[in-house]
Image (cartoon, rainbow, N blue to C red):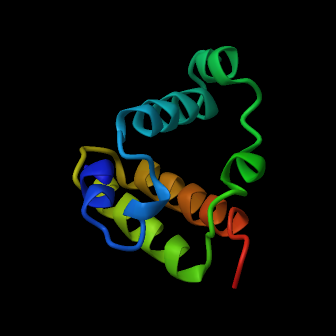
Amino acid sequence: RFYESVAVDPVLRPIYPEDLEPPKAHLAGFLAQYWGGPPQYTAERGYPRLRMRHAPFAIGREERDIWVRHMRAALESVDVSAEDAAQLSEYFEDTATFLMNRP
C-alpha cells in the first residue's frame, strides 16, 4: 500500500526511481532486519547508513510529513496490534525526521 501511494504522489514520486520494485525490496529487507529478522539486508547491501543513502535526495519537512502520512496509512491498512502500530509509527516519524537534510 505504501508504494501504491508513493507512485501517485506528486511530491514523493520524483524522488524514487521509475521502477519501484528495488526500493520496495530494500525497505522490506531493512525493516525485517531492523525488527529482528535475519541480516539479509546487510549481507546484500552493506551496513544501512540511512543518512548517507538518503543524502542525494532533498528531504525537507514537506517530504518528511508526506512520507510519514503514506506510511501511517499503509500501517493502518494491515492487521497489527495497537502496540506494534504505535511502536512502528514512532520509529517511522523519528527516522523520517533524522533523514531530513533541508528545512
Relative placement, left or right, of 90 versus 51 is left
Residue under the point 77% across and 49% down:
52
Q: Residue furthest bottom?
A: 103
Image height of 75 relative to 12, above or below: above
As rendered, which of 88 and 8 lies closer to the eye? 8
Residue under the point 39% across and 70% down:
69
Image height of 50 relative to 26, above or below: below
Image height of 79 relative to 46, above or below: below
Relative placement, left or right, of 54 versus 64 is right
As rendered, which of 87 and 62 lies closer to the eye? 62
The C terminus lies in quadrant: bottom right
| x and y percentages locating residue 40 in the rendered image | 60, 16
Residue under the point 49% across and 59% down:
15
Residue under the point 77% across and 29% down:
47
| x and y percentages locating residue 27 in the rendered image | 50, 38
Relative placement, left or right, of 98 versus 23 is right
| x and y percentages locating residue 86 in the rendered image | 47, 59
| x and y percentages locating residue 65 in the rendered image | 49, 76
> How many discs appear?
0
